[in-house]
Image (cartoon, rainbow, N blue to C red):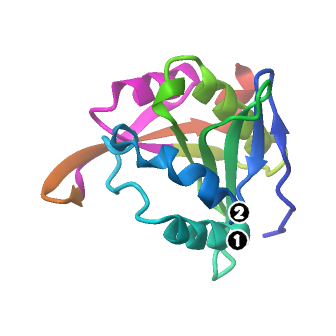
Amino acid sequence: MTVKIEAFLLTERLVLEPVRELHARELFAPLQDARIFTYMPEDPPGTPEALAIRYHLWERRVSPDGNERWLNWVVRLATTGEAIGLLQATVRAEAPAIVAYLLFPAHWGRGYAREGLSRVLRLLFEEYGVVCAAALVDTRNARSIALLRALGFRLAQTVRQADFYKGRVSDEHRFQLPRAVWLRR
């Protein structure tokens, strides 16, 4: 797998900036909002230092075994530079790229996730040659499901009891978007 330097990505209203270890201090406080993690099997980061360690690993842009490209961006408003969330893509040879997104609650419902994820999908399909993108979403997360459907993703599978977290069990949908479907949009 060829390793490319991750670029800043631009949309009409957003700047997607590659995540760096130095972003941990800036993002720690907004990531403490428990609403973000309602449908995710994890807690907010415990300390800025723990978040910095995670981001330092992501800064490598490639998994330790070299089989995955890790693309991670801080989502910023183009007008103010304010960080409003994160976008991610994990690119693996011979497998669908996995995309993920997280916006801070003050910015929900404004179309930013759709705008940013559209730009990431364009990068994946046009520059990385990805054949299919996939996203995993808790079956109760209606807003996320609506976003994926609006972008052309289709339900591929439902996994019952996919996540066990702090005594909670949740089901998960796997959505897929083939490159051919994306290009026909």
**Viewer-nearest of discs 1 and 2:** 2
Does the segment drawn in magenta span residue 61?
Answer: no
Q: How far across and how far down the image is residue 64, in percent?
A: 64, 81
Quick check: 175 left or right of 100? left
Q: Which residue is mark 2?
A: 22
Asked if one can make out residue 61 in the rendered structure from this viewpoint, the answer is no
| Residue with the most extreme bottom position | 65
Q: Residue 172 or 20: which is nearer the viewer? A: 20
Marks 1 and 2, how far apart at CA: 18 Å
| Residue with the most extreme left position | 167
Mark 2: give few (<14), some (14-19) or many (20+) Cα within 10 Å.
Answer: few
Q: Give the residue type at disc 2.
A: Leu
Quick check: 37 left or right of 9? left
Q: How far across and how far down the image is residue 62, in percent?
A: 70, 71
**Residue at (24, 45) in percent of width and height:** 171
Residue 77 to residue 185: above or below: below
In the image, which residues are magenta? 135-163
Q: Give the residue type at disc 1.
A: Val
Residue 62: numbered disc: 1
Residue 123 to residue 155: above or below: below
Secondary structure found at label 1 = loop
Q: How far across and how far down the image is residue 146, in percent?
A: 44, 22
Asked if one can make out residue 176 in the rendered structure from this viewpoint, the answer is yes
Residue 19 to residue 49: above or below: above
Secondary structure found at label 2 = loop
Tell me which corner region of the image, top left, top right, bottom left or bottom right, holds residue 95: bottom right
**Residue at (75, 27) in percent of width and height:** 183
Asked whether disc 1 touches disc 2, contact meaning CB atoms under 8 Å apart, the reply is no
**Residue at (78, 70) in percent of width and height:** 1
